[in-house]
Amino acid sequence: MTPVIGFIGLGHMGGPMAANLVKAGHRVIGYDLVAGALADATATGVEAVGSAAEAAAGADVVITMLPAGRHLLALYQDQGVLSAARPDTLFIDCSTIDVADARAAHEAVVAAGHRALDAPVSGGVMGAEAATLTFMAGGGEREFAQAEPVLSAMGKKAVHCGPAGAGQAAKICNNMILGISMIAVSEAFVLGESLGLSHQALFEVASTASGQCWALSVNCPVPGPVPGSPANRDYRPGFAAPLMAKDLGLAANAIRAGGVDAPLGLNAAALYEAFARDAGADEDFSGIVRAIRERTARPADQNGTPV
Ligand code: NAD
């Protein structure tokens, strides 16, 4: 029988994900703190209820899509969600959260007599709308097998990465690669500018040589070489800089907690944190090239550091 889904958190991502579950034939019982988000979801066929506990009661699978780990832990601890659900309900958290929070959430779910899977996503709002998300899952084999048909209604791929927290671990490691590589590509373009090298020439060489990466060949941070990249529409997202800053912050927490020697990851987190607070607040993460260029143009102090 098609499982009934409780869906908590119907924002930019959760709204279209829930809509795709309805399209795939699921009964979806939804809840969001924001009345507007709940009303939008109702228009797509989601049944709105007045509390998270009501969304969980009577569901076979409960999906959460919340801003951060503290929201998920508060939901599980304070709002009667775990006690309202039938025994052995599968709780799938698709939010991007701290690995430690994901593990604590798993423990809370299991202690309440249920089962848990962390399944953060990549693909952004467009992927959520088009049901082409990639899910990175952490939890048991049985939980993953039960979740797979549900996830396939919202995405094109689901990878079982390992036990509790492994999905979040994969997500932050991948996004750390992306953040560092976008900074590397942006610094290379600005260095090329200072050496009189055209964007097109650098792109043609690096995109077919050992400098090739997604940040260059798909999301190229300068306008021109890749017509579809956000640089060609004044850096409108795309993947917004504050979300990159959030993911790199989670990576930095894990780097510090594990005593990992990852100075580039820590530096990338600091650079994106500053960019997202300032000019990048509403920009695609590739807009960091402009911040690098702007700092480059400033006069340098006696050590060569821009002031
Ligand atoms: P969002 O802020 O648009 O949506 C989150 C929703 O959760 C909001 O509508 C909020 O009202 C609701 N909410 C918060 N606490 C709640 C509670 N206790 N009960 C019910 N509802 C509650 O955020 P989003 O862009 O949809 O992102 C959700 C998650 O997905 C985040 O963890 C984000 O990092 C991750 N993510 C986002 C993107 C993206 O492109 N937006 C891409 C990949 C991953």
Image: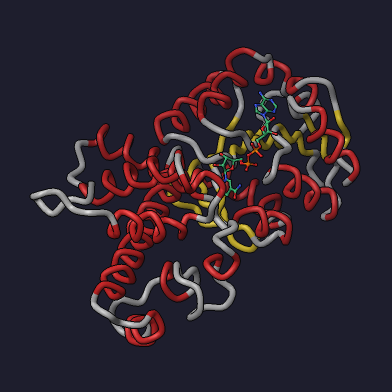
**Which quadrant holds residue 252?**
top left
Q: Is residue 163 visible?
A: no
Q: Residue at x 34, y 44 (%)?
A: 269
Q: Is residue 275 left or right of residue 39?
A: left
Q: Is residue 242 visible?
A: yes
Q: Position of residue 173 (x, y in %)?
A: 37, 51
Q: Which quadrant holds residue 11?
A: top right
Residue furthest to the left = 302
Position of 256 with respect to 133 (left or right) is left
Label tally: 0
Q: Is 157 rendered above or below residue 138?
A: below
The residue at 43%/43% (across/down) is 245
Snapshot colouring: secondary structure
Task: Between residue 45 and residue 299, name the one nearer to us.
Answer: 299
Instruction: Give the x, y percent position of residue 63.
Output: 67, 37
Q: Is residue 260 left or right of residue 217?
A: left
Note whether 128 is above or below 255 in the view shown. below
**Residue at 88% across, 38% down:** 42
Q: Position of residue 4 (x, y in %)?
A: 80, 39
Q: Nearer the viewer, residue 142 or 30?
A: 30
Residue at the spot x=49%, y=68% of the render? 219
Residue 71 location (% of width, % of height): 57, 25
When asked about the image quadrant of residue 294, the answer is bottom left
> Where ligand 1 lies, by quadrant?
top right
- Tell me if residue 264 comes above or below residue 80 in the rendering: below
Foreground: 220 or 168? 220
In the rendered structure, the answer to whether residue 110 lies left or right of residue 169 reads right
